[in-house]
Amino acid sequence: EPEVTQTPSHQVTQMGQEVILRCVPISNHLYFYWYRQILGQKVEFLVSFYNNEISEKSEIFDDQFSVERPDGSNFTLKIRSTKLEDSAMYFCASRITGGSYNEQFFGPGTRLTVL
Amino acid sequence: AQSVSQHNHHVILSEAASLELGCNYSYGGTVNLFWYVQYPGQHLQLLLKYFSGDPLVKGIKGFEAEFIKSKFSFNLRKPSVQWSDTAEYFCAVSAFSSNTGKLIFGQGTTLQVKP
């Protein structure tokens, strides 16, 4: 069964450093998402991406964040200058078509620790 | 703004006990409803979903959920839990009108089943 994959599984970085979290969505999916979960808190929507552009983003997704689909298979989340409060589990998800009917498939997550 | 509330943060049950996890949402329009499960060390997986029709939906592994529109609720049930049901359970909603289908999650319920 096709799966969403994410790398790395755990990333440790120093405050102020740039990090890139990578995701490979399911191959025939068209919609891509990033969510995050700070320890002990809710899973929060960050951004959705379709047709090579952001279709929706949350208040959390400020100028420090960016997303890209550089090569037709990877989907990346970049945090330009990490802060302590960016420490969280980051989940990538993909969906085959738009609208809210279809299931989003989630990756295993990347645990980001900012020191 | 949409929000989701899960009443139970941590539930401990013995095997064969019945389970009911509460979920309430706040949104003025039509919603699609989901329960996701995250087993230890694994990614979020869809347990069941409600889009329309019969408000009692059945999912995988013997789980079911009932949508009660008047109560804005979508409670998850299982008549007899097993040790393997130990996991974290997330209720999520998506606005029917949403083009992006972003999910709004509850804070999650940790279920621990004692053998």
Image: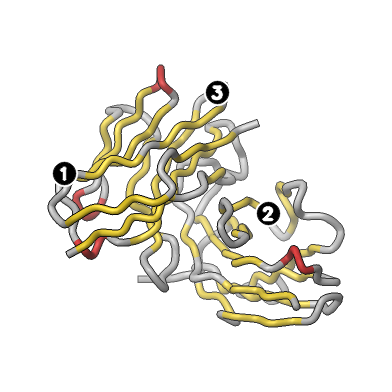
Among the 4 quarters of the image, the one containing residue A1? bottom left
> Who is closer to the viewer here, B93 or B99?
B93
Which residue is disc 2 drawn over? A46
At 62% from the left edge and 51% from the top edge, which residue is drawn?
A: A44
Q: Where's residue A58, x and y in %? A: 73, 47
Which residue is disc 1 drawn over? B79
| Residues indicated by labels 2 and 1 sit on the same polypeptide chain | no
**Of the residues shown, which amino acid type is indicated by label 1?**
Pro
- In the displayed structure, B108 sits above or below A89; it is above
Left or right, A3 with respect to B105, comes to: left
Left or right, B74 with respect to A58, comes to: left
Among the 4 quarters of the image, the one containing residue A15? bottom right
Q: Secondary structure at mark 1?
A: loop
At 44% from the left edge and 44% from the top edge, which residue is drawn?
A: B91
Of the residues tagged 2 and 1, which is closer to the observer?
A: 1
> Who is closer to the viewer here, B8 or A47?
B8
At 45% from the left edge and 32% from the top edge, which residue is drawn?
A: B24
Of the residues tagged 1 and 3, which is closer to the observer?
A: 1
Rendered-image quadrant of the N terminus of chain B: top right
Residue B29: which numbered mark, if any?
Answer: 3
**Of the residues shown, which amino acid type is indicated by label 2?**
Leu
Real-space Cα distance between discs 2 and 3? 22 Å
Callout 2 touching callout 1 (CB < 8 Å): no
Residue ranking furthest to the top: B70
Callout 1: chain: B
Q: Where's residue B51, x and y in %? A: 40, 34
| Residues indicated by labels 1 and 3 sit on the same polypeptide chain | yes
